[in-house]
Image: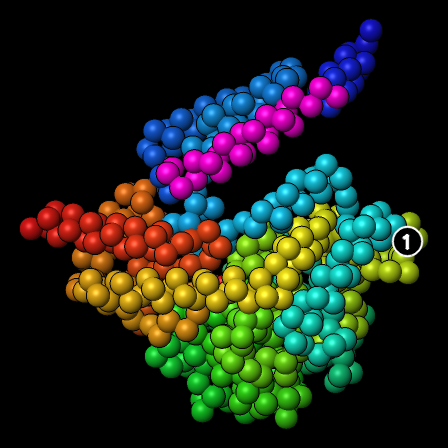
Amino acid sequence: MTRENDLWNRLNLEHENRESYRLALEFGCDYFDKRREQSVYPSAEALTALAAFDEKLPDHPMPAGAVLSQLHELGSPATTTQGGGRYFGFVNGGILPAALAARLLADFWDQNAALEVMSPIAAKLEATCERWLVDLFALPSDSAAGLVSGTSTATLCGLLAGRNALLRRIGWDVSEKGLFGAPRLRVVMSEAAHATVRKALAVLGIGAEQIEIVPVDEQGRCDPSQLPALDERTLLILQAGNVNSGAFDPFIPLCGAARAADAWVHIDGAFGLWARACQATAHLTAGIELADSWSVDAHKTLNSPYDCGVILCRDRGALVSALQASDAYIHFGDGRDGMLYTLEMSRRARGVELWAALKSLGRSGIDQLVAQLCRRARQFAAELRMNDFRVLNDVVFNQVLVACDSPDLTAETLGRLQASGECWCGGSEWRGETVIRISVCSWATTEEDVQRSVAAFIAAREQARASSA
Ligand SMILES: *Cc1c(COP(=O)(O)O)cnc(C)c1O
């Protein structure tokens, strides 16, 4: 028998005996069973053990079950426990059961969502998600959605569509003429714009010196009274959900001014756009329907698995024409060809788990999920205040910024908190001050989780005080 047959037989046997698939499910479920007790951040031992991965590429095949066992043994303890309810770092979501389950099934399908002809089911679910999201966010009814890896890419796609559309309106077709020698566009954005917005602009050929910055108020909201005069050559970039404070820009005056000037407005709503889908918070997003494009993540507030971001665009043609690619062998379908709405061609079918997340929650479930995250954030703020921590922002959504009596004490408390394994928060700077940054993003966070985390804050501050005494 040839070596080639050896490999085929081995792979086929592994496929048929299902051992590695059963193991994956068993390991995964065991992992979830322990998620509430496991340290929220990996222990020093678990991190040291990762050195086992520094081996050289094996010369020969190895059974799938053995590969998976190593992964579980060394990998699972070295994860941050995001699903356990006490991870509050960055803006990282949890994971919904139906979305995880759908993802597992879709992984067996292994579909390429580039074209309808490659995967009719992926195309159908993408189209369904587009319809549902446009409706849920109450955006102009013909708006298009592209499913991308996250808001970084979504913002890039939105700004690309906007840049090309503004130039086309003044007679310059970027696809034909390129950017060298093109009429100059203006970019106006908030001082508090996310790092990925600056990155997207850099990728698009717009440098930091070319950006007109609008100052923000004490909550991190773009100040409309300081907006420069806009015109038909302007890209205006706003945000729904400041990455530190969670604040929302005042969209009605800002988008209104942009529409009157025929400027293009892009809104970075990575986690905050979901406020629109919740009765208690929808007012924060009033006026976003006046914008031209919106970026949002499903892997944050919605608790869909990584990676899933969405670019929404009022003008379908502007998005599609900016992202076009064609060749004789690329067969477009009658339905939806996902690659027309994104940068990539081959892409995983992330619409499957997005669909499952939306379908399993429904309108009222999404409303409750968002409301619950906000409630836990307010609880966090109230309990921390009662224990003499300073909360520096108005807690309008899921973000809380906390400080102790001095910058040193704040930094030391954060270090102790992170080492405690009880909960995990990141640090940041807010209006020149060192802060601990709390982001409540997981459905799994309970009232008790917040209480336990506040107790961990108090213990960490005590240790910090003792160490400096
Ligand atoms: C997370 C985030 C981004 C970047 O999104 P990715 O999904 O990580 O690419 C951009 N803007 C804001 C406000 C964010 O919170």
Please name the residue that numbered disc 1 is placed on: 331
**Is residue 123 placed above or below 375 in the rendered structure?**
above
Write the residue at 65% across / 70% down: 136
Query: Which residues, given as a range, are shown in magenta?
Result: 16-38
User: Which residue is outermost to the top?
Assistant: 1
Mark 1 residue type: His
Q: Which of 448 and 382 is in front in this view?
A: 448
Q: Tell me how the rendering is colored.
A: rainbow
**Is residue 160 placed above or below 6 in the rendered structure?**
below
Mark 1: secondary structure: loop
Write the residue at 71% across / 47% down: 348
Q: Left or right: where does residue 332 sit relative to residue 32? A: right
Quadrant housing residue 428: bottom left
Q: Can residue 215 be seen in this view?
A: yes
**Is residue 159 placed above or below 217 in the rendered structure?**
above
Write the residue at 58% across / 47% down: 97
Q: Does the residue labelled 1 lie within 8 Å of ligand 1?
A: no
Image mark count: 1
Q: Nearer the viewer, residue 375 or 274?
A: 375
Mark 1 is surrounded, within 10 Å at the Cα level, by few (under 14), some (14 to 19) or many (20 or more) other residues, namely few
User: Which residue is outermost to the left?
Assistant: 469
Residue 64 percent across, percent down from the top left: 63, 22
Residue 243 percent across, percent down from the top left: 44, 66
Q: Left or right: where does residue 367 sit relative to residue 327? A: left
Residue 202 percent across, percent down from the top left: 56, 65
Quadrant housing residue 242: bottom left
Q: Does the magenta stretch include residue 32?
A: yes
The N terminus appears in which quarter of the rendering? Answer: top right
Q: Left or right: where does residue 7 sit relative to residue 358? A: right
Helix, strand or loop for the magenta stretch, by majority: helix
